Image (spheres, rainbow, N blue to C red):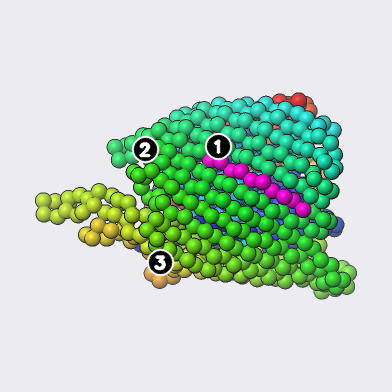
Amino acid sequence: MKRMLHTGNWLALALGSTLAPTALAQNDSSPDMADSTAHSDVETMLVTETRLPGDFQRAPLIIDVITRDDPALATATRWEDVISQQPGVHVSGSGRRNGQFVSMRGFDNQGVLIRLDGVRQDITTGHLGSFFIDPGLLKEVQIARGALSSLYGSNAMGGVINLTTVDAEDLLAPGEDSGARVSVSAATGNHELGTNLSLFGRSGEGTGSLDGLVSLGYSESGDIRRAGGEDAEDDAQLDSLLARGGWQVANDHRLTASWQHYQEDSRQPSNPQQLTASASNPEVDRDVTSDNVQIAHHWTPDAETSLQTRLTLSRQDIDDNDSRTLTRYGLQSDGVTRLDHGWLSQTLVFGFEVEQAEQNASAGASGFPDADIDTSAVYVDDTLTVGRYLADGGAGEFDLGLGLRYDNYQASNQDGDNSNHDELSPRLRFAWRPTSDLMLYSGYAEAFRAPTLTELYTTDRHFAGFCAGPFFCVPDNFWVPNPELSPETSHTWESGFNWQLGELSLRGSYFDTHADDFIDTEVDILAGTTQAINVSRAHLWGYDLRLGYQPNALPELDTFAALSEVSGRDRDSGEELGSQTPLEATLGADWHFSGNNLSLGWRGRFAQSFDGTEDGTQLPGYGLNDLQLAWQPGAQLSTSLRLANAGDKEWYRPDGSLGDGRSLLANISYQW
């Protein structure tokens, strides 16, 4: 039997500390794929949500970055618009905002950690999505692939996706202290029309300076066009809010506060992942609300050290026929420092997390038990660097990275059933740089995901009993709690390289993962029971490749290519897993018209035919073409256009669901 890898519940802190400013600089060459084309001999300490010290040439994993300059993010109205051009990353469902799950490297949404401004997003309730965000509020999306529990804890088995919202500095024009921006967006594929108003400003410079932003968004949308012309029924209104401010208390101390609000009211099928409503999947009125609040202190005593501590509150509420609420309180601190010992340099990343998550549901809500889970964690990651480049008479620079994270989680329900586990997540890596333009690396990492509260404690009816004939009937089927569930675990080896060769940049990695104690569902028809249990063992392997080319003879042209493939088998039965992905490629080219602030681009999305689905269905290969435009005719006006799936080709994701259909997405912004 083919199984989907279910992986899920937690976050943490894992790799280091940098990337956004570097990614922005490098990403000018190919907006979709964070390209390591730029390299500086002057190393800088940069701190961003991925916590990875250094630049992309020193990153021992594959990271892609999507910025607001990319039409894929600038025109996006839902999550699948943002990452549709990323090979190896998939969104399941039928395009509805609250029914989208992300999968990566053979792990489903429970094995891919989503973080919004550094806070995990992982409500788990049936077929509804685990995170809710208006893409119009984002300035950047970072996708880090690989086993990252040594920094981020639970759920980071296939990778981590960091979402970062805008702040005042991102929108202020050079030399200005205040401003306003009005944006209008539209998408034909889901009949969406929306608008956004942002007010932002700053007062003073240096110590005592203040800055702030308020951004309000509203949109209405209808049925969603899927590949080949079918429609997913939907009628939705979305309200979004982002409010944030900062105070430079002293030269090395800064306080910030933010509130991100999301509220969608919709009429859609009870299971939003299904294409249409039916007698067994009737339409419901559904209200989804998500609030994320945080207060943070940033301490930067020097250019080599940074410490950020934040107090967070996250709350998601889903109300349709019943009400389900997840509330999370957290305190976390993340630091990074670089030490120079002469012949040896050291980059130290460290932090801790304390968190409590509580689930509450109305009396009729199913699959969402009243329960809570307390989590505490501490982590450290140390990178030691020695040596000199070959050109300087040495044997090259060598990095030795050692990381370790300790997690403890304690879950309980109203009946006093407890689940208490400790997890250690080590990470070891080695890198060699014979020159400043080439790095070879290899490493080993362990990762895990804790069981969800639903898997541990749910007791509701799974499905009604039925009769298969006059003499054979089965009873109603009920979930049975299993507080003895063990966490899913994985052991991954990954090796790769980063190479800058004049006009060419090339990055690649190969991974091999052994995973154990998958959490699956065991159904006993005659006994009338369903229970989550630890079952199969799996072997996953695959690769990612990135190529960037900027010809010196044509400085207006940027091109890139990206490849990805994931294979997998059950280690006990030898059967193929249902979480594989076919060989996929994304090709792209952008032409920048000098002096006109105009860029035209093409993206090609391709995949081989594929039979590695959960039920063995043969899926045809496909080739999709996207066209895009970014134009800033003046300092105040900018526009982005994207024609997705221009040929309206019918295609299927690896889980068998229909992909996105043809849609013209547009965004026009005016700032003063």
- Which element is circle 2 on? loop
The residue under the point 69% across, 48% down is 296
Query: Which quadrant holds the C terminus?
Result: top right
Mark positioned earlier in the residue sequence (3 or 1): 1
- Relative to the observer, which residue lies in front, 640 or 171? 171
Where residue 276 sits, quadrant-wise, is top left
Which stretch is magenta?
A: 290-299
Residue corresponding to mark 2: 321
Q: Are marks 3 and 2 in contact (CB under 8 Å)?
A: no
- Relative to the observer, which residue lies in front, 442 or 617? 442
- Residue 301's spot in the image, x, y percent? 82, 56
Q: CA distance from mark 3 to mark 2?
A: 31 Å
Give yes or no for residue 280 being in the magenta stretch. no
The amino acid type of the residue labelled 2 equals Asn
The amino acid type of the residue labelled 3 equals Glu
Q: Residues within 10 Å of mark 2 (few under 14, many from 20)?
A: few
- Which element is circle 1 on? strand
Query: Which quadrant holds the N terminus?
Result: bottom left
- Residue 488's spot in the image, x, y percent? 48, 65
Residue corresponding to mark 3: 484
